[in-house]
Amino acid sequence: MPDKIPLDYDIDSYRYELPPEKIAQHPVSRRDCSKLLALTRPTGAIHDHVFTDIVDFFSPGDLLVVNNTRVFPARLLGNKESGGRVELLVLHYPKEMSLPEDGSGNCRGRAEVVGLLRSSKRCRPAQRIIFADDFSAEVVELLADGKALVELHYSGDLALLLEQYGRLPLPPYIKRKKGEEGRDRERYQTVFAARTGAIAAPTAGLHFTDDLLAAIADKGVERESVTLHVGYGTFAPVRVRDIRDHQVHSEFLTVSQKTADKINEVGLRGNRIWAVGTTTVRALEFAADASGMMHAAEGWCSLYIKPGYRFKLVKNVITNFHLPGSSLLFMVSALVGREQLLSCYRHALEHDYRFFSYGDAMIIQGE
C-alpha cells in the first residue's frame, strides 16, 4: 500500500468549488475599482476593501516591486498550403536569426521559435503555414507535449507583423468571439509594461493605474521593476497527485543591479518590500541568497515554490485569486498556509469577489 500523501502535498487539498459566474470574463470599468481582500498573516484577520485603499497599507520608505514584462500577440492563425486551419501559440518571444535583403531592398527575416500547434490534422515536419503574403512558418521538428520547433519567415519588421496578425494569448477560461479582443489589447497589459516577452500578463499588476501609482509615490513609497516573462506554465495543469512531483516550466527573468541594490537598501533600513504578483515573488526569491540579500540576475528560472519552502526575502504580497489545483495556489499557500489561504478564498466567494486574471485582488501583510 503506497504511503499516504500529506495534506499539504495532496493535489486534492487545493481543490475548491468555483461557480463559473465567479470567473471574471472582463475587467472592471477602471483598473483600480476592483475589490481588495486584506489578510494580516500574524493574526489571520480578513478585511474587505477596494483596490484604491491599497495606499493605506504602505508606509513612507516602503518599496513596491513590479514585473514590467509586456505580453506580445503570441497566437497566430494561419492555413496549411492544403487549406486546413492551424493555430500557432508562440511560447517565447522570437529571436531573429538573420535579416538579409532579398534583392529588392526588402528585408527577409527568419526566426526560430518553440510553439504549440493546433489543427484538425496533425502538422508534419517541413509543412508550411501561411499567415499572410509575406509572413509564414515552417515546421522544423515535432517535440514532446504537443510542442514544435518552428521557423518563421517574413518580410519587414517582425514585431509589427506580430502586432498586425497575432492575437493576444488570453487564458483559456476567458472566452472571446472573433473580433471581441480589441479592448484586451490595452487592459491585459499593466500600465508599467515595458519589456516584451510574456504570453500571459502578471495579473496582480493589472489593478494599478498611473494615478494610483502617483498617489503611492506621493506617500513616499519607492518603486522598482523586475522582468519575468510569464510563460505557458502559468496555464499548464498539474497532472500529478503528489504536488512534490510536479515540474514547473522555466521562465526568463532579469533583475538589474539597480533593483537589487534598492531592495537591499530598503531591507537594511527596516522598511517593507511589497511584491506585486507571484511572478515578482518568483523573481525575487530566485535572485536572493540564503541570507535574504538580493543580487543581480538574468537567466531561466525554474524555481518551484510550494508548502515547505523557506522564503528568503518575500513577506508582503499583492496577488489575484488563483485556479484550483494550480502551482500559483501552492506558492501562496507556502507563504500563508494552505488552510488560511482557502479560508480567504471561501470568504471571497461568499462576498462576491471575482476570480482569476481579470478578477479581484488580495493583499497579504506578513509583518
Image: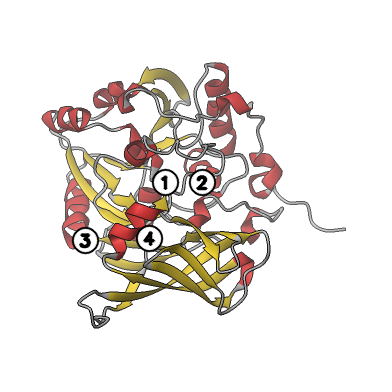
Q: Which residue type carries mark 3?
A: Ser
Q: Which residue type carries mark 2?
A: Leu
Give the Cα distance between marks 2 and 4. Answer: 16 Å
Residue 284 in sight here = no
Which mark lies nearer to you, 4 or 1? 1
What residue does disc 3 label? 256
Q: Which residue type carries mark 1?
A: Thr
Rendered view: 282 above or below 173: below
Q: Secondary structure at mark 4?
A: helix
- Residue at position x 50%, y 65% in the image: 115
What residue does disc 2 label? 328
What residue does disc 1 label? 278
Query: Sequence order check: which comes first, mark 2 or mark 4?
Result: 4
Mark 1 and 2 residues: CB-CB less than 8 Å, in contact?
yes
Give the Cα distance between marks 2 and 3. Answer: 24 Å
Mark 2 and 4 residues: CB-CB less than 8 Å, in contact?
no
